[in-house]
Amino acid sequence: MKYNRKITAAAAAAVMAASLCGCADTGYLMKVDGVEIRNGVYLYSELNALQQAYSEITEERREYGDTSEVADIFKENVDGETAENWVKREAMESVKRIVAVQRLCEQNGIALTEDQIKELNEQVNSMWNDENGYVQMLYGTNTLGEYYDSIGIGKDSIKDIYTADDLSNELFMYYYDTDGIMPVSEEEFNGYITENYAAARIIELEFKDYQGLMLKEDEEIQAVRDLAQSYVDRLNGGESFADIRYEVDLKNAQNEAQVNAEDDYDEMTAEARPDDRDKFVQEAVDAVTVEKKTDEQLDTILNRESTSSSLDAEVVEHIWNAAADGKAALLEQEDSCFIIVREDITTKETWKENIKRTVLNALKSDEFEERLETAYAEYSVEQDDYLVNTKYAPKKIKGFE
């Protein structure tokens, strides 16, 4: 079970038709290991669990070809358990997890900085005052904060949840970051990104003239092929990708400028039109400038698990099958030629730093959750049974009745 503060009213609206009966977030309904838990923190965890339960039931149905809506979630089972019991158990696990994070951070001297607290408060205030149109439509409240208030989740509870989430991130990195107490080795990190990501640099030369019209003559098409091969040869001869890409980008921009200038000239009145058309067009072409990007800026990163790439499927397949040796190769298709260079993903230091948290999470999130579960396994719970089992029972949430 992964803790997530990012649930919103709009997301929950996919399965909820209305809100809890009005109940103020003014008290505490339980103690976990001696820590008082606000009503709103438990309710938030319960809403999250209800959303997860609904998603799991829906996904399981779809596996069997059933696309019907869930009419009554409480007539369903989740993982062999009644939905109501599953939701209550998951909500309690979430609450215990919050306490475990707090305890472990205290033990290891981990705390949020003043800047982090300031940013957290700004996030809470921004969310609280968000005039979410979906919320207005479904619940009749003007802001997300009004919605949360209406179901018994106050701003202090939201702050508790956001704080727990940020502390959880800090604790995770305390364990597994490069300078953590149980760091992921560079070998393990590089092994993961090599298996799951690819870095490539790509240039496409289309079989088109400067106006964007498809070439028809074999000689013209061959000239594009020859140009593409010359780029491959130059790259493999040691020229930088950025230099060659600059040439291509500049030529494309000049072609666009030529078309625009020709159109402008033809649309001018006789009095305004210069005598020399060719000179007018050439001056527009000569005035063109483009930004020269660095090699790193031209990297395209592919994720093996992603299906959202805008690249042609054949290009993607070529990249995954190519050696990550920095050598250029030519891929010809019906309408264009691609110059493709697959790079060594492990050398992309800036990208690696940016994606570090994602990779560490993929490698260590299960271990981290097991560590937390071990920490809270023996926590005592003193709860108000009426609030937990009656007033704030899952079935009291309208839309799940």
Image (cartoon, grey):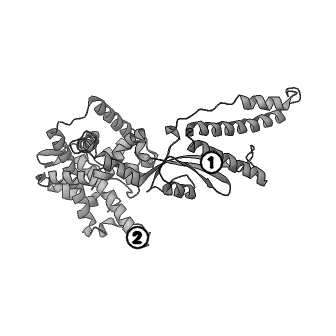
SS of the residue under disc 2:
helix
Camera sees residue 244: yes
Label 1 sits on what residue type?
A: Glu
Could you tell me which residue is drawn at 68 percent across and 38 percent down? 251
Could you tell me which residue is drawn at 51 percent across and 47 percent down? 200
Q: Quadrant of residue 78?
A: bottom left
Q: Which residue is mark 2?
A: 63
SS of the residue under disc 1:
strand
Q: Nearer the viewer, residue 8 or 371?
A: 371
Q: Nearer the viewer, residue 177 or 117?
A: 177
Apparent side of residue 195 relative to residue 216 in the rendered image (left or right): left
Q: Quadrant of residue 392?
A: bottom left
Outermost residue toward the bottom? 64
Q: Which mark is residue 204?
A: 1
Residue 399: image x %, image y %?
35, 59
Neighbour class for label 1 at 10 Å: few (<14), some, many (≥20)? Answer: some
Could you tell me which residue is drawn at 69 percent across and 31 percent down? 288
**Above or below — where is 355 with respect to 11?**
above
